[in-house]
Amino acid sequence: MNLTGVARQADRLLESAVKILDPGWQAAVLSYGMVVYKDNKVYKYAAQVFKAAS
């Protein structure tokens, strides 16, 4: 994974990482951390959700 040019902020790095995963993967930024998972579940308290490219 090449993260050259990606801002060194946790949410930008997470978003970039998830975009290269297979479809069905997503990540959520929660108040207590971040999760990456293969499911369509949306966390009620997610501040941000990133999905892999379809």
Image (cartoon, rainbow, N blue to C red):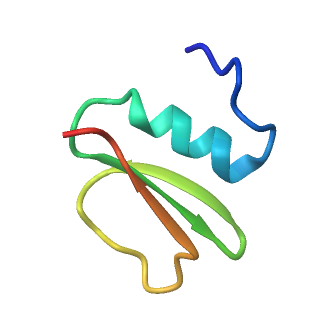
Tell how many labels. 0
In the image, farthest residue toward the front: 5
Q: Which of 45 and 50 is in front in this view?
A: 50
The image shows residue 16, relative to residue 45, as above or below, that is above
Quadrant where the C terminus is found in the figure: top left
**Residue pictured at 26% horizontal, 30% vertical:** 22
In the image, farthest residue toward the bottom: 44
- Image location (x, y in percent) of residue 46: 52, 76
Res 31 → quadrant: bottom right
Q: Is residue 13 left or right of residue 50?
A: right
- Image location (x, y in percent) of residue 6: 69, 31
**Residue pictured at 53% horizontal, 84% vertical:** 45
- Image location (x, y in percent) of residue 25: 31, 44
The image shows residue 18, relative to residue 27, as above or below, that is above
The image shows residue 40, relative to residue 19, as above or below, that is below
Q: Which of 35 and 21 is in front in this view?
A: 21
Quadrant where the N terminus is found in the figure: top right
Q: In this view, does 22 lie to the left or right of 48?
A: left
**Residue pictured at 74% horizontal, 48% vertical:** 10
Q: In this view, does 47 lie to the left or right of 43?
A: right
Q: Is residue 6 left or right of residue 50?
A: right
Q: Nearer the viewer, residue 34 or 15?
A: 15
